[in-house]
Image: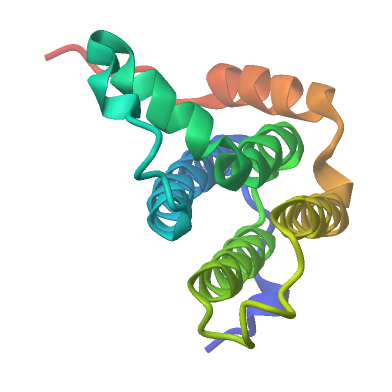
C-alpha cells in the first residue's frame, strides 16, 4: 500500500477533469447557498406594507431586489473562486466547508439564533464581513492556481495527449 504522498503526479487530462468538476461544484454550491440565504433573509424582513407580489410580471424582480444584500457575498465569492480555482481537491473541499459554515452562521444571525436582535451587527456589516471572509479564503486556498495560462496549457496538453477514439 503506497502513501498518498508518493503517488505519481496527475496527467493533464485528469487535472483538467478535476478542474472542471471543482468549478462546477463551487458554482452550484454558491448558487444553492445564495438561494437559501435569500429566503432566510426575506423571512426576517417585515414587508407587509410593501406589496411587491402585486407588480405582476415584476414580482420576481422585486423579490430579488429585496434579498440582494443576502445574495451579494455569494455572487462575489463565486466570481472570485471561479477565476482562482485549481485542480486540487483538498483546497476545493476546504473552501466549500468555509463557505457553508459562513452561510450557516449568517443564517443563524439573521434568524436570531445567535444572540439577541438588539446587539446584532447590521446587515451591511454582516454582508461585508462575509464577503471579505470568502474572498480571503478563496485567495488563500487557491493562491497557487491563479495563473489562467496554466489552465489553457493543461487543456491543450490534455487534448494532445488524450487517446484517439477507436472506430466502432
- Residue shown at 56% from the left, 35% from the top: 68
Q: How far from the left and from the top, in percent, is residue 99?
A: 62, 62
- The answer to which of 99 and 147 lies nearer the viewer is 99
Quarter containing the C terminus = top left
Is residue 130 depicted above or below 67 in this figure? below
- Residue shown at 40% from the left, 33% from the top: 50
Is residue 137 depicted above or below 139 in this figure? below
| Residue found at the far front of this picture | 49
Q: How many marks?
A: 0
- The answer to which of 11 and 103 lies nearer the viewer is 103
Q: How far from the left and from the top, in percent, is residue 56?
A: 22, 12
**Residue 2: which quarter of the image?**
bottom right
- Residue shown at 39% from the left, 39% from the top: 49
- Residue shown at 74% from the left, 55% from the top: 134
Q: Is residue 133 left or right of residue 57?
A: right
**Residue 35: which quarter of the image?**
top left
Q: Is residue 54 left or right of residue 43?
A: left
Q: How far from the left and from the top, in percent, is residue 78?
A: 63, 39
User: Would you say residue 11 is visible in this rendering?
Assistant: no
Is residue 100 depicted above or below 140 in this figure? below
| Residue found at the far left of this picture | 168
User: Would you say residue 81 is visible in this rendering?
Assistant: yes
Q: In this view, does 72 lie to the left or right of 143?
A: left
Is residue 67 depicted above or below 3 in this figure? above
**Residue 141: which quarter of the image?**
bottom right
- The answer to which of 2 and 116 lies nearer the viewer is 116
Q: How far from the left and from the top, in percent, is residue 22?
A: 54, 46
Amino acid at each position: 500500500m503506497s502513501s498518498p504522498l508518493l503517488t505519481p503526479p496527475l496527467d493533464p487530462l485528469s487535472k483538467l477533469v478535476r478542474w472542471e468538476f471543482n468549478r462546477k461544484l463551487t458554482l452550484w454550491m454558491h448558487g444553492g447557498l445564495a438561494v437559501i440565504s435569500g429566503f432566510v433573509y426575506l423571512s426576517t424582513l417585515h414587508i407587509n406594507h410593501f406589496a411587491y407580489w402585486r407588480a405582476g410580471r415584476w414580482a420576481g424582480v422585486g423579490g430579488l431586489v429585496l434579498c440582494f444584500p443576502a445574495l451579494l457575498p455569494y455572487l462575489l465569492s463565486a466570481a472570485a473562486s471561479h477565476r482562482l480555482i485549481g485542480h486540487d481537491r483538498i483546497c476545493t473541499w476546504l473552501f466549500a466547508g468555509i463557505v457553508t459554515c459562513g452561510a450557516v452562521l449568517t443564517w443563524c444571525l439573521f434568524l436570531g439564533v445567535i444572540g439577541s436582535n438588539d446587539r446584532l451587527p447590521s446587515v451591511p456589516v454582516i454582508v461585508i464581513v462575509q464577503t471579505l471572509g470568502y474572498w480571503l479564503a478563496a485567495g488563500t486556498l487557491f493562491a497557487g492556481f491563479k495563473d489562467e495560462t496554466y489552465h489553457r496549457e493543461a487543456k491543450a496538453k490534455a487534448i494532445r495527449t488524450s487517446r484517439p477514439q477507436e472506430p466502432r
